[in-house]
Amino acid sequence: MIPYLQEKFASDRWEMELFSLPKRIRGKGREEVVFETFDWTQYGDSPVVQKYMQTYRDYLWWTRLRVQKPYDLIHAHHPIAALAMKTVFPDTPVLQTIHSSYERELILNGRIEEGGAEHRFFLSIYRELEAKTDQLITVSEAFRRYMSPYIDHPDRIRIMPNGYDERRFKPVPHENEIPQLMCVCRLVPAKGLDVLLKACSLLKERNVPYVLHLIGDGPSRQELEDMAQKLGVYDDTIFYGYTLHPEEFMPFFDIFVLPSRAEAFGSVFAEAALCCLALVGTSVGGVPEQIEHGVNGLLVPPDDPAALADALEQVIGDPAYRYELARTACEKAKSQYSLNRVAIELKRLYLSYEDRNRRSV
């Protein structure tokens, strides 16, 4: 989203630069790190925490090396970036958008244990962000509620859903003899693709026609391919691997399905809606804020293959209903998740800090 958003600020009034840590920068940072709200070293024996903190040190090192001129405002889209920028530029307002729950993803993907040292470390980062940054922003009301127990003033969190450039998503009139299901995501347990394959096996038992397109890659790919073979749905499933611009052929499918176990917002649902696909998702995180069940998509409980199969059968078997769901979803996405809307809201927010600076002089 961010490079497309930068185009909206391309004028004499605004000068915006993008800054990030290159992948090649690893292990360069040596700076001692002390947090204001908790002692991170109590979790320092964890390799996961060690890797996170080394990335933070690397970001500090790279920022001090490459960023020389001052800025009026910094908007970070990762906690490490926000904390590093505020350390290097303590007098500059830093806004932080939190897009997702890294700790929740690690738990669902089997990388860390719920309630363990790593989990407690990542939860502590939220209060550190609150203490250090000038404004916390998140992408859904659901994620604000998720963060609330871990910060002091959840009422001060600003909600700003992601925005999408409509020019990238062009619905295409088409007729598929067999309904085409698609899913775009990383192939990890958190996305619930095992549930999707089980639901597809139920569809096959019911003689419901479909083809499933799985676009993305990840550590679970071989396991999912093996599962598809065992369930007898491999011949009906296409594993694409990583694809740079899935939105270019997304409009030629019929139904977007993603049975996630957790989503802060679920950006890909908005993207699929802009391509005029019918949406089927799980009632987790910010997904129900995008999908009103039976109006612009269907919602099912997580980890419920039978409920997912029932929902898919409903939209597969009724093309008119499927089209109505897709059309309504597209209209909502255009009105609520446009990049223009986000740009206008951000400009107002940025200007409010300019006004504050004037008043403080």
Image: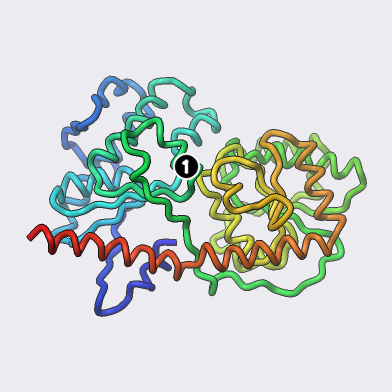
Residue at image position (25%, 71%) is: 15
| Residue 144 percent across, percent down from the top left | 44, 42
Q: Is residue 157 visible?
A: yes
Mark 1 Cα shell of 10 Å, populated few (<14), some (14-19), many (≥20):
many
Image quadrant assignment for residue 79: top left
Q: Is residue 13 above or below residue 293?
A: below
Q: How many marks?
A: 1
Residue at image position (60%, 43%) is: 187
Q: Residue furthest bottom?
A: 12
Residue at image position (37%, 39%) is: 154
Is residue 155 left or right of 250 when viewed as pictured? Answer: left
Nearest the eye: 112 or 319:
319
Q: Which residue is mark 1?
A: 143
Nearest the eye: 237 or 78:
78
| Residue 190 percent across, percent down from the top left | 58, 37
Q: Is residue 283 above or below residue 45?
A: below
Is residue 27 left or right of 341 when viewed as pictured? Answer: left
Nearest the eye: 223 or 187:
187
| Residue 9 percent across, percent down from the top left | 33, 72
Q: Residue furthest right?
A: 207
| Residue 326 percent across, percent down from the top left | 71, 63
Q: Is residue 33 above or below residue 272?
A: above
Q: Given the image, on which type of amino acid does mark 1 rest?
A: Phe
Residue at image position (27%, 35%) is: 128
Q: Is residue 239 visible?
A: no
